[in-house]
Every structure is written in C-alpha cells, then in structure tokens.
Image (cartoon, rainbow, N blue to C red):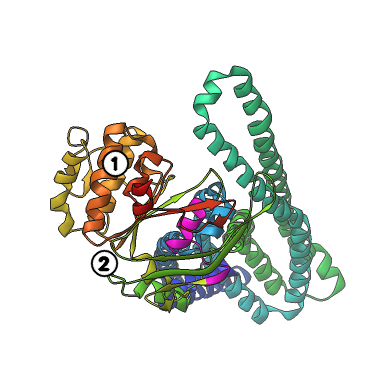
Amino acid sequence: MKLLSLLFQASRGRFLASVLSGLISGACGAGLIAMINRTLSHAQAQGAREVALFVGLVAVALVSRIAAQVWISQINQDALFDLRLKTSAQIARAPLRQLEEQGAHRLLSALTEDLFHLTNAMAMLPRLVINASTVFGCLIYMVLLSRTLLLALVVCLVLGIATYRLSTARALRDMRRAREVQDELMLHFRSLTDGIKELKLHARRRDDFLSRVVADAAGRVKDLQRRAATAFAVGSSWGMFLFFVVIGVLLFLLPQLTEVNTASLVGYTLAVLYLQQPLMSLMEGMPLISRGQVSHAKLETLGLSLSSSAESARDAQAAVEPRPSFQTLELRGVTHRYQREHDDQTFTLGPADLVLRPGELLFIVGGNGSGKTTLAKLITGLYSPQEGEILLDGQPVTAQTVEHYRQHFSAVFSDFHLFDRLLGMDGELSQVQGFLERLKLEHKVRLDGKAFSTTALSQGQRKRLALVTTLLEDRAIYLFDEWAADQDPAFKTVFYRELLPELKRRGKAVVVISHDDRYFDVADRLLRVESGRLLSDWGTRDSLAAS
C-alpha cells in the first residue's frame, strides 16, 4: 500500500518499532485469550502465579499498544508535514506550461481536497497497523490451538473478504469518478468568486448559474459519494454478520462434521469475539483509506509525485548566485506551440531570433493574442523552447541550468501576484521607504518588519508596489508586461521617462511589453510580434528620432 510506504519513508526506525510493539500487543492479546480459555475449561481456582502472569500480560499489552500508537502517530504527523511541503514544492518546481494546462482549479483541489483525504487516510493508518498486528497475533494462537478450526475460519474469512471487495469495488470506482467531478465543481466555485460582481448585477444569470451549473456538479458529487458510502456500509454490515456466521459454524455445524475438542472450540469462539473489534475497525476505516488512495493517485496523475527523487533534492540544494550578471542573451530559432482553449487550434510562436545585452531597452509591441506574453515567458525561462535554444553568454540553457538562468530576471507580468511581504531579502529593506515615496505609496503602505501593512489597493497601486519589489531585487534583466496599462498619465511618465532610463544607466537589460506608442522613443529597439511571428526590429531610437 502506497500510504504505508509514505509512513515507512518518514521514519523507518520508528515505523518498525511501532509494528514490533503492535505485534507484541497482539501476542499479549492472544496470550490473554489462551489464559481465559484455559481457566474456563479447567473451572478451578488459579494461584498467584497465574494471576501475576495475567496482570503481566495486561500490562505489557497496554504499554506496547500505547507505544505503538504514539510512535505511529508521530510518524503520521511527520509524514503529513513532509507531504504538504513536498506537494507545494512539486507545484513550485513543475513546468509552468504544465501547471497552466492543468488549471488553477485542479491544483487547488489537489492542495485542499486531496491533501484533506490523505490526511484522514493516514490518520487511520495507526489503527490499521495495530489492529492488523492484533489479528496476526490471534491467528498464531489459533494455529497452535487447532488447525481444523483454523481451516474453517480461513474459509469463512476468505469468503467474507471476497464478498466485501465485490461490494466495495463499485464504491471505489464511484470515488474516483466523484474526484473527477470535484475538479469541475472547484472550477465553478472559482467562477462564483471571480464573477461575483457580474452575478450580483444579473439576477437571472446568477440563478441560472447556481441552479444549473453549480447544482448539477454538486449533485453528481453527492450522488456518487452517497452511492459509495452505501456500498461501504453494506460491506461493513456484511462483515459483522459474518462474525456470527463463523461462530454459528464453529458451535453448531463443525461439531456435526468432525470431532472437535471443547476447549479448542471455546478458545476459537473467544478468539473470534476478540477479533470482532479490530476487524470491524479495519473495515470501517476502508472508506477513508480508499479515498486516500484515490487522492494519492490523483496527485500522481497531476504530475505531483510524492516520492523523493534525486533531481528534486538536487534542485532544492542547488546554490544559486543571488545576483548573477551576463554579457549576451540569445534566442536562436526558438519555437513554442500550445493548444488554444477557446478554439482548440494550435498556436505557434516562432521561430524567434533575438539578442539582448546589458544596458539595452527593448520594447515588444503587437496586438492582443499575438504572442507577446508567450515570448516573455520564453525569454525569462518560464517556458522551455520546443525547438531551437536559448544561450546565455554563448552557453545553451538546459534543464540543469534553467534555475540559475531564471535568477537573472525580475518581472511584473500582467497577471502578477503581489505577496504581502518581502521574501528572500534582507539588506535591501533600507531602500523601501525611498521607493514608496517615489511612487506615491508612502501614505498607503508602510513596511512592518518584512511585511507590507496592506495590499488592499487599487490595481494601479498594486502594480506600483510590485514594481517596488522588483527594484529591490536588483536583477540583471527586468521585464515589464503592460505595467503602465493601469497607471495615471503622471505615473506613466515617471515609469517611461525616469525609471526605465535609470535602469538602463545602471547597466540593466530591460524588456517592456507596451502599447504606449507615445513613449516608443525611449526604446533602443522595437520588436513587433504578429500572430506568433517576430518581425525584424522595425524601429530604433535613432530611426524614431529621425522621423
């Protein structure tokens, strides 16, 4: 079972110790049954030795059971901690194109729905291990007691397990299907929060969305999960019924078929009754374990492998130069293709050829959907070329060096995210106040330690605050994707006429995606993108000045 392997990876020593403690507890339980059976069969008073042995078995069973539960619970929490961090790290390391194709709603489902069910499933594992150890100990006692009776018990158990799995096989399929529909439901929830203004302004649209779209997906999830829960309930009740079937066979049918020792019969009956609780606990925990397995498989399907890998460890430990420099950045025959969501057609950018040097201002222009942002993601190393190559100082950027390559960039994309604190910075904090004042944010935002006092700002103010963060990063290459689109004319002037030339004077290479043609004269070069094709530089500072 993969969930058990996750616990085993968390701490092999404690895991083996907990299993050993569980086996000792199970053995002590079997010993207690043997003592009770012997006492009932002989029907005579017991001496101090037997009493001491009984108390000793009870004490050892208690201590070993507590130890097993404590150890396995600690391992469980450690595994869950590692699981959350590892899943987050897998998302952070996954290729951006892959994450975009999966969609934010699927990733949110993985981080919420799947991790929730994995948490519940792994919380059940301590009881599973201990109860399985108890069953194992009792089975050893039964082997010693009577092989004939053991054969009858095994036949009944095999029949019970087979019928239980038959009744729950469809339940597992329903769980998998419900998990798929859960992604669809999460997408609708995102539409509910992202489109709340539009829904409030159009009552019929809101009612149609809630009653048809949300209710349909939620209803399918409900029906599938209800059907799965019913199947598991039937299977669990059938297991309880089988206990009494086994007892009936032992007490009434087996003595008619073969000669059975009374003491052995009593011992087996006691053992079966003793096994009822751990076996029922195992069966009742199967729905949670099954949901956990479905969630684990879903995470694997999304490409978020939970197993350790040498590559992941190498990436995490790779030393990255904080502010690397460069001499030339070249795109040579770079091509990138992807499927458009709205028309199911393939969009191709390239082949693209581009050279960028320090102290250069490059403006990228073009219509909406022409491929400007895709080109920006290729330049920054967020997308990998499907054909051609990117060279930094004459060396090709490979999968092993792309992490170092990305550290040359600081960017504000059109769909940027503004973190509420300055992460990965220390000495730069003294410059924050000056940038806030320059961008007229000192009355809106202050820095408390490393955290901004607020990010609840207008879109233009949020972009200015994001610009503050990028300026503090002091990288070799800056990329701004329609940064000035939400700014007042005064801030556009500051951005184009002051900040960009200042970055150029400091030897920074700057790539600006822009529609502000009145500021094109700031650029050293202008590159137009049309339907994925890069046209030759169609404007330079000198040519614009001459015109």
Tally of numbered discs: 2
Front position in the image: 547 or 240: 547
Position in image of residue 71 (x %, y %)? 40, 68
The answer to whether 92 appears left or right of 133 in the picture is left
The answer to whether 354 appears left or right of 492 in the picture is right
Residue sitting at the far right: 257
Front position in the image: 307 or 152: 307
Is residue 448 something that shows in the picture? no
For residue 323, the mark is 2
Q: Residue beneath label 1, please? A: 464
Front position in the image: 379 or 180: 379
Front position in the image: 81 or 515: 515
Kindly indicate the quadrant of the structure image that contains residue 146.
Answer: bottom right
Residue at image location 73% in from the left, 49% down from the top: 231
Q: Amino acid at mark 1?
A: Arg
What crowding class fits label 1: few (fewer than 14 Cα within 10 Å), some (14-19), or many (20 or more)? many
The answer to whether 270 appears left or right of 358 in the picture is right
Q: Is residue 502 above or below residue 333?
A: above
Image quarter hosting the N terminus: bottom right
In primary-sequence order, the first of circles 2 and 1 is 2
Position in image of residue 174 (x %, y %)? 72, 50
Q: Are marks 2 and 1 in contact (CB under 8 Å)?
A: no
Position in image of residue 330 (x %, y %)? 43, 69
Is residue 137 something that shows in the picture? yes
Position in image of residue 145 (x %, y %)? 66, 78
Q: Amino acid at mark 2?
A: Arg
Q: Secondary structure at mark 2?
A: loop
Q: Is residue 118 above or below residue 264?
A: above
The span from disc 2 to disc 1 (Cα, nearest Å) is 22 Å
Q: Which residues are magenta?
A: 372-388
